Amino acid sequence: MNLINIKMSKILFLAVMVFIFSCGDSKEKQKVIEKQVNLVSQDSTDFIIAFYYNDSVEIGFEYYKKIEGNLNSRQVSYQNQVQSKTQKYQNYVSKKQKDIQAGLLSENEMIKVQQKAAQMEQEILQYQQREGARLEEDMLKNMQTINNKLEAFGKLFSENHGIDILMGYSSGQQINYISPQMDVTSAFIDFLNAEQKKLEEGL
């Protein structure tokens, strides 16, 4: 009987140790997951809320940077064109005013100068209206495309990580404090770039 009791005690001891180590492994795995994506349960219902910094996404999301870079380049080109046309108009008017003051132009020539100056001014206004409106339209369209991607990828990211609410946070919003443990910015940016790359490779 004593030998049986000793054997049973050893078996029970081994079983307890296996259970303890298995629990330890589970906790270690949980810690690894939390390092990858920080998730905070707000209450006993395991309701998960996470957030990302909008300005970090603008810097880290390659697709966003590419679109923004293209729009900025077009904006600079547009401004340069307006400046060039305006400078050309001003130079023409300045030169002809000097000619008029020097008595070099006849009445008919002065009328032609006025007509040409008015035409140049009108062309500048038309260019500003046409190209400015086109640039603004493209800007709004591209921003909507980016927002759609963030919404779609955000939904997929949340589903993958069991997040109930994923918020984009910007400085100045009416939120007094958000725990850093709820910050998934880095993981979300990596996810955005990976998913966008998959889409582009499949085209």
Image (cartoon, grey):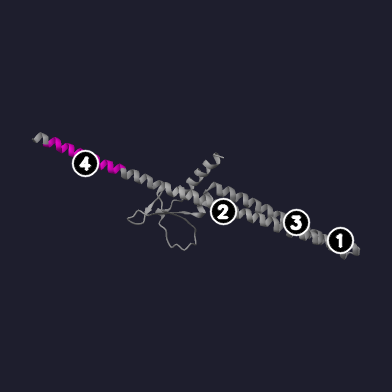
Give, as a single range, the part of the protein colored magenta: 5-25
Mark 4: few, some, or many residues within 10 Å (few <14, many ≥20)? few
Using the rendered view, name the quadrant where residue 18 is placed. Answer: top left
Above or below residue 181? Residue 5 is above
Q: Position of residue 119 (x, y in %)?
A: 80, 59
Q: Is 114 on the left or on the right of 71, as rendered?
A: right
- The verdict on residue 21 being magenta is yes
Question: Of callouts 1 and 4, which one flags the residue occurring earlier in the amino acid sequence?
Answer: 4
- Helix, strand or loop at label 3? It is helix
Q: Is residue 160 magenta?
A: no
* Cα distance between the residues tagged 1 and 3: 19 Å
Do the residues bearing badges 3 and 4 touch, measured as CB atoms within 8 Å? no
The Cα–Cα distance between marks 1 and 4, rounded to whole angstroms, is 103 Å
How many residues crowd mark 1 within 10 Å: few (<14), some (14–19), many (20+)?
Answer: few
Q: Which residue is mark 3?
A: 85
- Mark nearest the camera among 3 and 2 is 2
